[in-house]
Amino acid sequence: MRCAEVGRQMTGARSYQAGLAAEDQVAQLYDRSGRSVCARRWRGSGGEIDLIARDGSEVIFIEVKQSKTHAQAAEHLTPRQMARIYASASEFLAGEPKGQLTDVRFDVALVDGMGRIEVLENVYAA
């Protein structure tokens, strides 16, 4: 294996672990605020949703983005990824008592290199 390949693998592993740590931090933040996290890394046919929480009868779909700064983290969310999240959220809601009529919110949690969290609530609202 070449040095460049090993370097990419190590960088990828670090990024993966940083992402997991960021998701844990965000999950703890939601739990502390009384919005219990009911699923982590929920996978539907459209893709993965990082966290799903509940606030009473409302379901909150949370995408976690981690980078050196909040601005850089926000840049990592693409329209294609948002479409996948919508598709998976729709699939999740099919199992809810009210189905697609369930009150929902889509949040994006940005985590910077210092571990500071900025939550953008209902970010996909039209």
Image: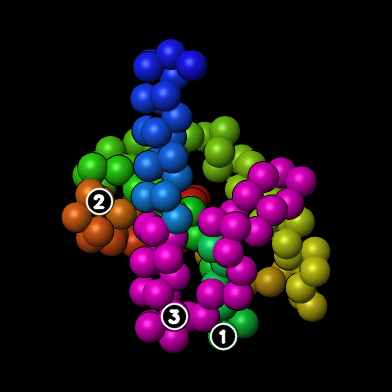
Q: Which residue is drawn at 58% across and 64% down?
A: 40
**Does 5 lie within the magenta span?**
no
**Foreground residue, 93 or 15?**
15
Q: Pick whichever of labels 3 and 2 is earlier in the sequence.
A: 3
What is the distance, in whole Å, between disc 1 and disc 2 at their CAs?
29 Å
Badge 3 marks a residue whose secondary structure is helix
Does residue 98 appear left or right of residue 27 in this picture? right
Q: Is residue 58 visible?
A: no
Q: Are marks 3 and 2 in contact (CB under 8 Å)?
A: no
Badge 1 marks a residue whose secondary structure is loop
Where residue 33 appears, x then y in whole percent? Answer: 38, 82
Residue numbers of the magenta segment: 21-50
Q: Mark 1 points at which residue?
A: 56
**Foreground residue, 31 or 86?**
31
What is the distance, in whole Å, between disc 3 and disc 1 at their CAs?
13 Å
Q: Which residue is drawn at 69% across and 53% down?
A: 43
Q: Mark 2 points at which residue?
A: 112
Q: How crowded is mark 3: few (under 14 residues within 10 Å), some or many (20 or more)?
A: some
Indicate the amino acid at tag 3: Asp
Q: Mark 3 points at which residue?
A: 31
Compared with residue 46, is residue 63 higher up or lower down, i.e. above or below?
below
Indicate the amino acid at tag 1: Gly
Q: Is residue 84 visible?
A: yes
Where residue 28 appears, x then y in whole percent? Answer: 40, 75
**Foreground residue, 36 or 100?**
36
Q: Which residue is drawn at 48% across and 34% down?
A: 78
Q: Which of marks 3 and 1 is in front?
A: 3
